[in-house]
Image (cartoon, helix red, strand yellow):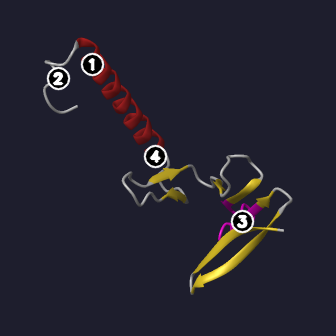
């Protein structure tokens, strides 16, 4: 933390030090996790405030499109096809009451969504 915290109550100083330590530990863990996979074929693009992160090669990614994180409730699993590594395998799960709809958006973009039957 930047700034002088010495005039704060001791409990507040301890809390700030504890949180600073936690932030530093999490940053180290993130750096370790994302630097161990040079040459990987999977990268998470974070277009907001965190840096992009390399994931282990051939990592499968689950997207939860429902309000819950239930494995087969409107999830889309994307991975590089193991038998044909120049292709993506996309598996959509709608938990029985939804069907998958794929709609084009532009020449190289399409949307995957779930529509209730």
Which of discs 4 and 1 lies nearer the camera? The answer is 1
**Disc 2 designates what residue?**
5
Residue 116 in the figure: left or right of residue 3: right
Label 3, secondary structure: give it: strand
**Disc 3 designates what residue?**
89
Q: Compute the Cα span from label 4 to label 1.
A: 33 Å
Label 2, secondary structure: give it: loop
Q: Position of residue 35 (x, y in %)?
A: 43, 45
Quadrant of the drawing holding the C terminus: bottom right
**Disc 4 designates what residue?**
34
- The answer to whether mark 3 and mark 2 are in CB contact below 8 A is no
- The magenta span reads 78-92
Q: Is residue 7 visible?
A: yes
User: Which residue is depicted at the point 24% across and 12% down?
Assistant: 10
Give 5 or 116, whichever is nearer the viewer.
Answer: 116
**Disc 1 designates what residue?**
12
- The answer to whether mark 1 and mark 2 are in CB contact below 8 A is yes
Q: Compute the Cα span from label 1 to label 3.
A: 50 Å
* Label 2: few (<14), some (14–19) or many (≥20) C-alpha neighbours in 10 Å: some
Mark closer to the chain start, 1 or 3 = 1
User: Which residue is depicted at the point 75% across and 62% down?
Assistant: 91
Which of discs 3 and 2 lies nearer the camera? The answer is 2
């Amino acid at each position: 933390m930047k700034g002088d915290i010495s005039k704060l109550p001791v409990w507040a100083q301890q809390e700030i030090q504890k949180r600073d330590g936690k932030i530093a530990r999490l940053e180290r863990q993130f750096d370790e996790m994302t630097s161990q996979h040079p040459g990987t074929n999977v990268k998470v693009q974070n277009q907001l405030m965190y840096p992009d992160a390399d994931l282990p090669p051939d990592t499968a990614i689950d997207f939860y499109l429902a309000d819950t994180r239930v494995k087969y409730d409107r999830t889309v699993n994307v991975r590089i096809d193991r038998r044909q590594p120049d292709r993506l395998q996309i598996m959509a799960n709608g938990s029985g009451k939804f069907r998958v709809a794929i709609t084009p958006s532009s020449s190289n973009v399409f949307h995957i969504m779930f529509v209730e039957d």
